[in-house]
Amino acid sequence: MTDISAPAEPALDISRRNLMVGAGLAAGTAALSGDFSPVAAAPAGGASGQFSDGYVTASDGARLYYKDWGRGQPIVFHHGWPLTADDWDGQMLYFLSQGYRVIAMDRRGHGRSTQTNSGNDMSTYASDVDALVKKLDLRDAVHIGHSTGGGEVARYVARHGAGRVAKAVLVSAVPPIMLKSAANPGGLPMSLFDDFRKQLAANRADFFWQVPIPFYGFNRPGKPVIEGVRQNWWRQGMMGGAKAHYDCIAAFSATDQTDDLKAMRVPTLILHGDDDQIVPYQGAALLQAKLVPDNKLKIYPGFPHGMLTLNGDVINPDILAFIKR
């Protein structure tokens, strides 16, 4: 496990007032998520495992969008709230260039998938992943989840992944549970998540415009807003359904995944930034490392919650080395 040399600051109270702090606009260019070599072209609409996209139908009839590029050992990417498979563009291009088959799905209610009124919970999310995996007959797969997607990975691996999963990666992930309780005194108060719901219901577009500021650490000194990154976060969020996004707040904050982490019987890489203002690493990565039987923990000094976008040049090679070992 990696030693942590400096304590992180407490998680921000992501109320409207605090989200606005330091949100002045500045010009900038998003950092690439990693160098990648040219990829040989494949025919448009090629068979699964070349370059394709499509839909898988869940058990309740929801249509779930996915994209599936390349050949080789499959890597399945699980995005965070309230984003889409597009949040993995940098990683998909990077690992595609390294000879892997890369797959990402829009979670139900998010992106291009059905804007579901029900089933917006961690168990159903994991069942949806199982439907995708079985449709594509994925085996020896690596599952990588960011934030809420990390919770999805933990539940999928614990309940459905036997015989199909080679390794897992949890990045800035929400398990074991974010919500403060008698059993989890170090968690975040319910009032914070109630405020999320209140702001989403009152003006989702404005709320989603403010969240990227702490998400990417743009409120830190010397960290100007990268406007394209902020707009891309907002674009992805507004593609999904308000009801599903509202329900998912409970899914990522109040789902106790202690048993899921204990049941992850595959080598697991745990990555987190110590300046994560959305999911503080002390109540997430450090506890994950105590619960997952076979894990490697790495804490990145100064990296924010959205470090996959801003710091992919560092993180992508670390994940690659873990997959190859």
Image: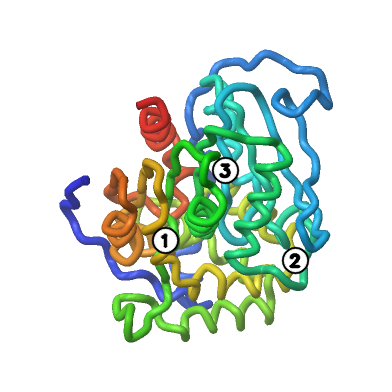
Query: Which badge, 3 or 2, comes first in the chain's sequence?
Result: 3
Report helix, strand or loop for mark 3: strand
Tell me where residue 321 appears, x and y as whole percent: 37, 28
Task: Report which residue position mark 1 lands on.
Answer: 219
Q: Do the residues labelled 2 and 1 touch (CB within 8 Å)?
A: no
C-alpha distance separating marks 1 and 3 = 28 Å
Q: Is mark 1 on a helix, strand or loop?
A: loop
Q: How crowded is mark 2: few (under 14 residues within 10 Å), some or many (20 or more)?
A: many
Q: Hey, what amino acid is under mark 3?
A: Phe
Residue found farthest to the front? 163
Q: Which residue is disc 3 drawn over?
A: 77
Residue highlighted by disc 2: 241
Amino acid type of the residue tagged 2 in the rendering: Gly
Q: Quadrant of the C terminus?
A: top left
Q: Residue at x 63, y 22 (%)?
A: 71
Residues at circles 1 and 3 in contact by the CB criterion of under 8 Å? no
